[in-house]
Amino acid sequence: MEKKVKIVIDGREIEAQEGKTLLEVALKEGVSIPYFCYHPKLRIIGACRMCIVYNEKTGRLITSCNTKVEDGMIISTQHELVKSNQKYLLQAFMTRHPLDCPICDKAGECDLQNYGAIFGPQRQIVPVSALEKERHYTDWESDFLEYYTNRCVVCYRCTRVCDDINGARALYVEERGFHANIVPTVRPIDTSSCEMCGLCVHVCPVGAIISKPFKYWTRSWLLKKEKTVCNVCPVGCEVQVEYGIGDWRSKKKVYRTKPTDDLNICAKAFFGYDVLNKNRLLKPYIYEREETTGNAVNFLSHLFRTKGEETALVLSSYLTNEILANLKEIALRSGCFVSSPLTADFYTFLEGYGDYTPMYIREIEGANHYILVGDDITSTAPVLSYYIKGKVYKYGRTYKDAKFNPKYLKDLEELWDVVDKGSVLVINTTGMGKEGTDIGTLIRKLSQERNCKVLLLHKDTNYLGIYKTFEKDMLSHLGSIMEGVKRCSIKNLIVFGEDLLDYYEMEELEEIFKGLENLIVFSPFADGLSEIANVKIPMCLYGEVEGNYYTIMGVRKSKRFLPWAFKEEDFYKDILENMPKEKRGVKVLKGYNPHTKRNVHLYRSNWITQRSENLTRLYEKNAYLETSRYPA
């Protein structure tokens, strides 16, 4: 049971939880206290001293961020000593801070700017000349992050978020006092241990660290802001999307993506947001002609009703649970084939492992140790790596997983030496192929004998959604479907997304598709598979679709708010309404799957991220690291 204490803040009696800090309690109760270095997700260091309050009982000033509440405390946030000291500290922060708010990207959301307005005009309290105001310039040698030395208030937020949240340890503080600068451990930072998650940009209370792709594009107060769930990887992070609606304020496009105070974000969202603006397919096309949504619904409904048994669906793991449920019902009523690229690795693993009860991030925190099996976990689901703390063992390809400083296992038999009841096994099934069945058998036996936790991972967002929606006996093997297309027993192929390109080259697919009567592609993009399709229908990205995903954070709800969004979920409901009620059952083809060992890269993990110009530049700069720094 939580113990409560009673304290008084500014004459108001408050009941607070024992163990909380004064600042946490005050903020929760709506009491305004200025601060720079504090963040609810970061360890407390008391660096900025702006959060001082007056303890009436002791007659002393104390920092509220690192002082625990005690029963009977009487605290004042408005005492004359508090205000005078805070103003003095603010003037000290301003001593070397340039007055460049008109060109600073942080303007409008800068803590220093806001406190300057609250405390009134500042005066210089340290007798330094204009030349002495300049800190030593530190070049991060980056195409994506820019550091302004004089704007920095040395709050250590950036170094703490990099060390304690991400774990990349890519930044440190050089020198002390007025000479202090934030410096990358390796330069250029773009090719260091940095994962370009953007957390240092987000937590910076001033404009000391900025995102170059966002620099000078617009002002924060001119943008619309909404929250949704990122659907680029299987973690399910809540993100803030800032966009223009095409009025006088800004162009109709997404300008940036940021994390919430949970600090769950990675490069795929922070810098990969530009995919939302590039080569988008926003309206249906039938035989190169733009059509209404109603005509597209009628075309597909007729196809399902009349040629269902000659039709196959290739599902994407980037579809919502609701859309997957509708597609399942359409398949049952039309008698078509259903497949997914997941049959080539995730389901192959399950053939050996058996039924899987999904495990979530909150269930694996604080384990004795972690054993990572398969391709690079950090590249596959970066934010999952933020929650893996402590000793790590690794079997499989390592790239960014090197940040764990893992102990490497030479073969799977060594798992018997390190797995116990307190272990968590994280198995990345991505690209496992035929050997996945044997690995699955081993992991099942190990987990049963040692009673350890197992989290099965795949790079695709809603792989658990497909697993929960479609029984494994309902899904045809992907390779068998492609063979059916080659033999012309399958004459109509409906492809969702471009997951196929993880297993086939475009030239190979063009050859396979030659005998089709209709190639129907649902895609967010006008290029890629859409270019060779007879019929192309929009598919939505985050911020454009309303629905739920099964992620490793649990069921997460996506929200539609972007003004150009196609109403995807309504499209499938309309098709279903045009289908007969009678169920024919799903046809199944088994026996063959494509086999490929595709390595996942942090900046190029799927067909969505590979379209990002920002992530492509990062990928090209970092590609050599896979062989030179982090060999398999």
Image (cartoon, rainbow, N blue to C red):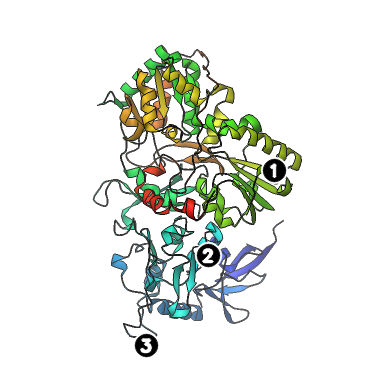
Q: Residue sitting at 49 percent across and 74 percent down?
A: 50
| Residue type (three-letter) at the residue carrying disc 1 | Glu
Q: From the viewer's perspective, is 129 left or right of 427?
A: left
Q: Residue at x 48, y 54 (%)?
A: 628
Camera-side residue: 406 or 120? 406
Residue 3 visible within the image = yes
Q: Amino acid at mark 2?
A: Arg
| Residue bearing the label numbered 1 | 413
Mark 2: few/some/many CA within 10 Å (<14, 14-19, 20+): many
The image quadrant where one finds the N terminus is bottom right
Q: Element type at marker 1?
A: helix
What is the crowding at mark 3: few (fewer than 14 residues within 10 Å), some, or many (at least 20)?
Answer: few
Image position, residue 169 (x, y; %): 52, 62
Percent coordinates x, y for residue 306 in the rendering: 40, 12
Q: Position of residue 200 (x, y in %)?
A: 45, 61
Camera-nearest residue between 483 and 99: 483
Specify which label sits upstream in the sequence, 1 or 2: 2
- Disc 2 secondary structure class: helix
Picture disc at residue 127: 3
**Residue 191 at what x, y percent from top left?**
43, 58
Query: Number of numbered discs present?
Result: 3
**Residue located beneath label 2 in the image:** 160
Of label 3 and label 1, which has the lower sequence position? Answer: 3
Q: CA distance from mark 3 to mark 2?
A: 32 Å
